[in-house]
Amino acid sequence: MGAGVVIVLSLLLAPELLPRASAVDRSEFPENFLFGTSTSAYQIEGGYLEAGKGLSNWDVFAHKRGTIQDGSNGDTADDHYHRYMEDINLMHSLGVNAYRFSIAWARILPRGRFGEVNPDGVAFYNAIIDALLQKGMQPFVTIYHYDIPHELDKRYGGWLSPEIQKDFGYFADVCFKMFGDRVKFWTTFNEPNLFTKLSYMYGRYAPGRCSKPFGNCAFGNSSAEPYIAGHNIILSHAKAARIYRKKYQGKQGGHIGITVCSRWYEPFQNSSADISAVERDCIFSQCELDPFEGEARVLTSAERDGVLIGKRTGSPMIYTVPYGMEKLVMYYKERYNNTPIYITENV
């Protein structure tokens, strides 16, 4: 990774229990320390066909019978599209000074690069960014948080086609041009290492593609498609980062990176085999951060085993491991030569 790359981490490390959290005081942190909140467009915005917005993959997926267990969808969600000022005021009342949100691709480019920029969509995000800055909150913008214009899935299969790299580059360019004078922190993708598996291996996320034994979808190939999509995502990230550095970073002075879902692994025993297994898993699960050299290879099947560490929380997949945060951050610091790191989620 070249100089200036920003690593953005989404950590699966449960925080301590709430009673202990009350003992934390803001004054214990540096004045310029960023405390923030985080959302994504499809999860909160609603207004799914308002003011020129096009259909997204999630709009289509959530409307299919049986894809969402309780039959809900994001047509209205938290109605952030109409109530964003209320939400910003609530964040301000918490005393946070940063807000991470994503831009709905289909709200800006309803048909991808095959249509026009939607001025109402641009105006919506301009209003959010301006309101945040007026309240003293730094906007952290995620360009892609799982929602893609449905048009692109229909035309060429979305992330399964190299064509997506052109569309993502175009979308990122529009975002930099429209919002980059005020946005100084950009994330190209949110957790591609999760998205590719949940969308193309298990079929639980849009577009819902998989094959047995991983799931029972109408279409898909769980042994290949997650890696095809991942390959196109990595190249799309590189394309967007190149556009930003060449055209915008010099005058806008911002930073750009990618968010990966990160886990910390401990060897079961202090043996060379267990230590080696931990190192391989750390490298593979964060492979989006490393460049490919020579002939590209993919792992088409894998098994995992292990013992979960720490106290169990309310979620069956999350355990409380406070020391994991420090170990994981130090691992990245050493592996990537002290590259700037921002923790955008801590589950």
Image: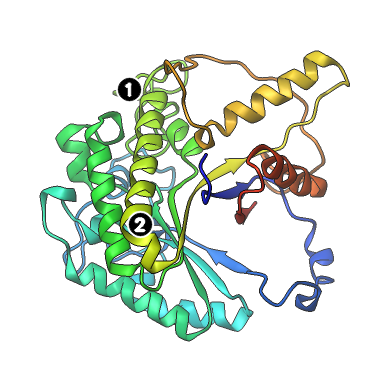
User: Residue 141 or 289: which is nearer the viewer?
Assistant: 289
Q: Is 336 above or below relative to 17?
A: above
- Is 320 left or right of 33, judged from the image as shown? right
Question: Coloured how?
Answer: rainbow
How far, Cα to Cα, is label 1 from label 2?
24 Å
Check disc 1 and give the amino acid type: Gly
Q: Which residue, as the protein is rendered here, is positioned at the far left?
A: 115
Looking at the rendered structure, the secondary structure element under dot 1 is loop
Check disc 2 and give the amino acid type: Gly
User: Foreground mark, 1 or 2?
Assistant: 1
Q: Residue 288 in the image: state x and y as whole percent.
A: 50, 35
Mark 2 highlights which residue?
74
Residue 220 is tagged as 1
Q: Is residue 73 visible?
A: no
User: Residue 251 or 203: which is nearer the viewer?
Assistant: 251
Q: Which residue, as the protein is rendered here, is positioned at the far right?
A: 270
Q: Earlier in the sequence, mark 1 or mark 2?
A: 2
User: Residue 266 or 253: which is nearer the viewer?
Assistant: 253
Q: Is 45 above or below relative to 202?
A: below
Looking at the rendered structure, the secondary structure element under dot 2 is loop
Q: Residue 69 in the image: state x and y as whole percent.
A: 44, 42
Q: Residue 347 in the image: state x and y as whole percent.
A: 65, 51
Instruction: Residue 165: name its quadrant.
Output: top left
Residue 323 is tagged as none
User: Residue 63 or 332: which is nearer the viewer?
Assistant: 332
Residue under the image location 46 percent in, 80 percent down: 133
Instruction: Residue 54: name its quadrant.
Output: bottom left
Residue under the image location 41 percent in, 26 percent down: 226
Task: Sort mark 2 into few (<14), some (14-19) or many (20+) by Cα contacts within 10 Å.
Answer: some
